[in-house]
Image (cartoon, rainbow, N blue to C red):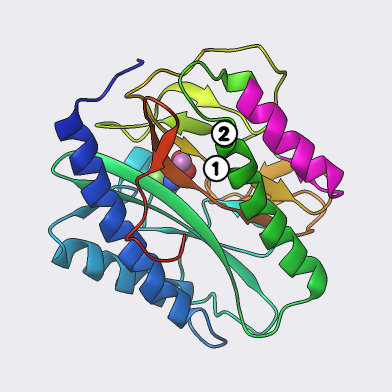
Amino acid sequence: MVTIKSSREIALMKKAGEILANVFDKLETLCIPGTTTKHLSDVAEKMIRDAGAIPAEKGYYGYPAAICASVNDVVVHGIPSANIKLKDGDIVSLDIVVSYQGYMADACRTFPVGKISPAAQKLIDVTRECFFEAMKIIRPGVRVGDIGAVIQKHAEENGFQVTRDYTGHALGRSMHEDPSIPNYGTPNTGMPLKEGMTVAIEPIILEGRKETRVLSDGWTAVTCDHKLAAHYENSIVITKDGYEILTTNGGKI
Ligand code: MF3
Ligand code: CO
């Protein structure tokens, strides 16, 4: 279902996004050697609930945790665990959805743990750049294929691959609404976006081959070649002349 949001609905999504940005500010300080991904999830869940909101991933199609914490070759949907301890040189993607008065904000950051390799830093940087490359063309009328093409081009120009298995998406009262927004595509194809649509743009970029597979827990997606994956995501609203990022507290994005 494609929906156009009222200014009231957009304000609620912004509030959800502000709570989420505050959570990232806190979790970034905890991405140090020795922290377990379970601890990151517990801290996030408490902050979200204390703010009067809900961690919407918990229970979504049976997903068992409040956040996704995907380390190194885990692409998406890493389940937080007391057995997964961050170590020097890791990268960890934290993908979180906050629901505030029934409205969702979805974002992801990939943080370094301790001192990481230049190759890992480049992957993190290019993944974030892919998002901002896409923002350069966002305005009413931009088509889904235009967005995917820009993200794919920037990733491939830097020697990386985009996943075909997970996509961005519209969102609002539901975590996933139509249209899907793949990280690859052909210009001038796909649905045109309109003012008032709210979408999550989420480059998921792989250091090696593009193939992924899901582990036997039914959730954890890993790269087939066990090379690194990075993920960067914000929820945005399409405005009259461009866009506004919803998942921010006015600080670093
Ligand atoms: N936050 C993810 C996204 O970017 C979805 C997570 S699936 C869940 O769309 F089961 F963990 F909620
Ligand atoms: Co998303």
Q: Is residue 49 above or below residue 40?
A: above
Determine if the C-beta at disc 2 is less than 8 A from ligand 1. no
Secondary structure at badge 1 equals: loop
Q: Which residue is mark 2?
A: 167
The residue at the point 59 percent across, 45 percent down is 131
**Picture coordinates of residue 15, whole percent (x, y):** 22, 50
Residue type, label 1? Glu
**Picture coordinates of residue 238, whole percent (x, y):** 40, 29
Q: Which residues are magenta?
A: 146-162
Does the segment drawn in magenta span residue 151?
A: yes
Disc 1 from disc 2: Cα separation: 7 Å
Does the segment drawn in magenta span residue 23?
A: no
Mark 1, Cα crowd under 10 Å, few <14 / some 14-19 / many 20+, is: many
Q: Is residue 76 above or below residue 44?
A: above
Q: Are marks 1 and 2 in contact (CB under 8 Å)?
A: yes
Determine if the C-beta at disc 1 is less than 8 A from ligand 2. yes
Along the horizontal axis of the image, is 132 left or right of 159?
A: left
Quarter of the rendered structure image containing ligand 1: top left
